[in-house]
Image (cartoon, rainbow, N blue to C red):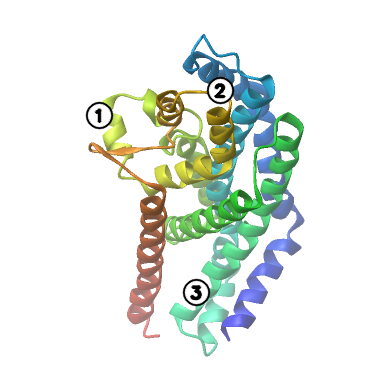
Amino acid sequence: MLPMLIKRDCKLFFKDKGSFFSALITPVILLFLYSTFLAKLYRSTFVSAMPQVFSADNTLINGCVGGQLLASLLAVSCVTVTFCVNLITIQDKTTGAIRDLTIAPAKRTTLALAYYISTFISAAIISLVAFAAGLVYLKAVGWYLSLSDILLVLVDIFLLTMFATALSSIICYPLSTQGAASAVGTLVSCSYGFLCGAYMPISNFGSGLQKVLSFLPGTYGTSLLKNHLMRGNFAAMTEAGFPGEVVEGIKRSIDCTPDFFGHTVTVPEMLGIMAVSVAALICIYVLIYFIAGKRRGK
């Protein structure tokens, strides 16, 4: 029953050309907007952080800017796309299909897992397309990625998409109209980029806000992407003769080494935080459906 439900939900999303192309074009538009408006800001940040005695190659600077742009793009799109895909659950409510599905011999927890897995699959496909477009962009401005870096970024994308799928599923569960879901998706799209440090590094915020944002898993998801997309750039800086403290300072300025109440969070710890957050949110999501099923006697 579960594979059939997953296949059904995926088919519904890709069959709806409007929703599919809307979700697909969003990362491409973001890449254009980021490269147009944020590139200058990121470039000035890197140039100001570099010692005046060093003259960095333009390709290195452009590669750093490109890596940060792509990390910011993926951090936002992996989350916002799931809200577009989750419109399928709202559609089932508005059309009454949810009643037919619950009448069928399938538990509500099975239905919840089907929604979750199908949303993850559809959103991951969109995110991978965005990543592929980003790689083309990096190839044009400055390429410092290795195969291992690309594989690690793929792990980050899957983790962040799993996290976003669970989060959007919980938020969208009580909604019953596509208008409400679209409004929530727009609100998340506008605010999440700031909260996760995609639009502006969290290191630029006040100390109080930094401490608050250090509790949010999305902060570490963004930092993981930056670490893995820019590892080659930092290695190139070291090879060019940049002092270690300068490289570390640049990492801190763009949230590659986030701070949690005086403790510098390492990459393995970030991966652990994201994995635990995903597991916790999935449990909450399935529990919501389980409790709802108990109340309805199924």
* Quadrant containing the N terminus in the rendered view: bottom right
- In the rendered view, does 37 fall on the left or right side of 198? right
Between discs 3 and 1, the one toward the N terminus = 3
In front of the other: 148 or 159: 148
- In the rendered view, does 10 fall on the left or right side of 162? right
Q: Which mark is residue 42?
A: 2
Tag 2: amino acid: Tyr
**Residue at 57%, 71% in the rendered image:** 96
**Residue at 51%, 19% in the rendered image:** 45
Q: Does residue 179 appear anywhere in the picture?
A: no
In front of the other: 260 or 84: 260
**Residue at 72%, 48% in the rendered image:** 132
Q: Residues within 10 Å of mark 1 (few under 14, many from 20)?
A: few
Establish if 115 lies above or below 22. Answer: below
Q: Quadrant of residue 6?
A: bottom right
Question: x and y percent of residue 213 in the render?
Answer: 33, 38
Question: x and y percent of residue 162 in the render?
Answer: 50, 60
Q: Quadrant of residue 11?
A: bottom right
* Quadrant containing the C terminus in the rendered view: bottom left
User: Which mark's residue is nearer the viewer, 1 or 2?
Assistant: 2
Between discs 3 and 2, the one toward the N terminus = 2
Question: x and y percent of residue 271 in the render?
Answer: 42, 55
Q: Residues within 10 Å of mark 3 (few under 14, many from 20)?
A: some
Q: Secondary structure at mark 1?
A: helix
Q: Residues within 10 Å of mark 2 (few under 14, many from 20)?
A: many
Tag 3: amino acid: Leu
In front of the other: 269 or 296: 269
Q: Which mark is residue 208?
A: 1
Q: Secondary structure at mark 2?
A: helix
Count of numbered labels shown in the rendering: 3
| Residue linked to disc 3 | 113
